[in-house]
Amino acid sequence: MIQPENKLKRGWDVIVLAAAISAAIVTPLSIIFHLTGFSLLNLFNGFLAILFLVDIAVNFNTTFSLHGKIISDRGVVTRKYLSGWFWPDLIASLPVGLLFFISGLLTAGGPLQLLRLNPLLKLPKASRTLRRVGGARINPAILRLVLLVFWIFLAAHFISCSWIFISGNPNGLDPVSLYIRSFYWTITTLATIGYGDIVPTGNTQTLFVVLIELLGAGMYGLIIGNIANLIANIDVAKSQYKEKLEKINTFLKYRNIPASMQKKINNYYSYLWESRRGYDESSVLQDLPDHLKVSVSLYLNKEIIEKVPIFQGAGEDFIKEIILNLIPVVFTPGDCIVKAGEVGFDMYFISKGSVDVMSADERIHYATLGSGHFFGEIALLLSMPRTATIKAREYCDLYRLDKETFDRVLSRYPEFAETITDMAEKRRAENEAAEKEKDQ
């Protein structure tokens, strides 16, 4: 059985969709312009029939999801398809155009020719196919906008062809000119701005025009409203970010916060937008079930796992214990992350950016730590005040691990406790050596 999310199945669905759209464009044109000879059109109709028949066979062998469970029982799949899309798919696959050509009915005029529009029964699946194929990669608002424009132009194409079908070609125009004039009439009528240069001449045409004008009046408001809504929602995150920033700036001005501090706050939020598009990882993950939360957290923090030495060769349970308890934090240039002499309750892992490690009076520069390094473990391990002051050199994305989790991990993973204790002792010795060198 074929999985609906299989790449080959998605590719096949795109081919069928492209064929259905092509049929929706070509078939009405072949009817109104009386294309009756054996030509590429007949080959196209034959190709459509074969393609759609193969698609029926594919659908009989494609699983489906029910209440989150994949149903692969052939009998259940068959019954579901027979009770759903099978009959429209079967009718769409009938080679009506070829049968008309063989029987000579292509030369017959009137409503009988409308039977050749049977491939259009595939079109209702277009939206579903596009959402399934592109939904995971394309912004939903953009996808909805694309679908709206697609249906508008397809409707305009059908109306243009219908106008030619009803009115004929009284002025003897060539096919291209005739279609362009008809499409022009359709757009101006639907947009309710008709100029009156193309007018109905009989009852049938008049009734058709009234119908299209009523349709246009309804569509105009619907289209404008939908487009405005879609454009507003193309980037929801950015809209929410701007709204939040406006509220913050209003508050800062109301409370007479100094301009320098306002600038720093604005720079902070600008960095959050550039680096995270305004999303808070913790709030996004909090509603996920544990197994998904673990998978997403491991993926989001894979750079930390790859760069931090204590994670190299560590067991999966240990890594999960640490990663699930990391809290993302951001510091701006010059921010004091750790102050020498203070009691320590957290340690930090550097994801992006770099920090300066300095003495309490900031006269001695011990080291510069970058991506993949960690700090703050000395105070937690050795139960002593912070031994150094650490400041952000630039915008820094850090992950904070609190003391409670740190102590729990130490008790459960003695090999980690041994490794990090050795590192802490080494760093403390280096700091003390630097202090002594300064005193000399």
Image (cartoon, grey):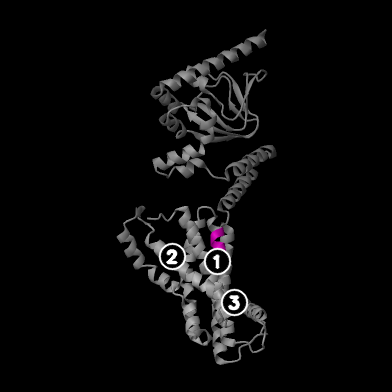
Task: Estimate the x, y position of residue 432 in percent, counting from the top left.
Answer: 59, 12
- Decide which of tag 3 and tag 2 comes sooner along the chain: 2
Horizontal placement of 321 versus 21: left or right? left
Q: At label 1, which amino acid type do we have? A: Leu
Residue numbers of the magenta segment: 142-150
**280 lies above or below 192:** above
On the rendered image, what quadrant is the N terminus found in?
bottom left
Observer able to see residue 371: yes
Q: Residue at x 44, y 72 (%)?
A: 93
Q: Tell me the residue that label 1 is attached to.
A: 148
Mark 1, other Cα within 10 Å: few <14 / some 14–19 / many ≥20: some
Q: Give the label, 2 or 1, closer to the camera.
A: 2
- Going from N to C along the chain, the mark reached first, 1 or 3, is 1
Q: Nearer the viewer, residue 211 or 407?
A: 211
From mark 1 to mark 3, how far is it between C-alphas? 15 Å
For label 2, count other residues whose C-alpha is less than 10 Å away and answer few (under 14), some (14-19) or many (20+): some
Residue pictured at 39% horizontal, 24% vertical: 412
Disc sitting over residue 54 in the figure: 2
Image position, residue 151 (x, y; %): 54, 69
Q: Quadrant of residue 30?
A: bottom right
At a point 57% along the width and 81% down the height, the residue shown is: 35
Could you tell me how far apart the alpha carbons at marks 3 and 2 are, in whole angstroms? 38 Å
Q: Residue at x 43, y 65 (%)?
A: 54
Tell me the quarter of the image containing the C terminus: top right
State the residue position of label 3: 190
Q: What amino acid is labelled 2 in the image?
A: Val
Q: Is residue 116 above or below residue 5?
A: below
Residue 46 drawn in magenta: no
Amino acid type, mark 3: Leu
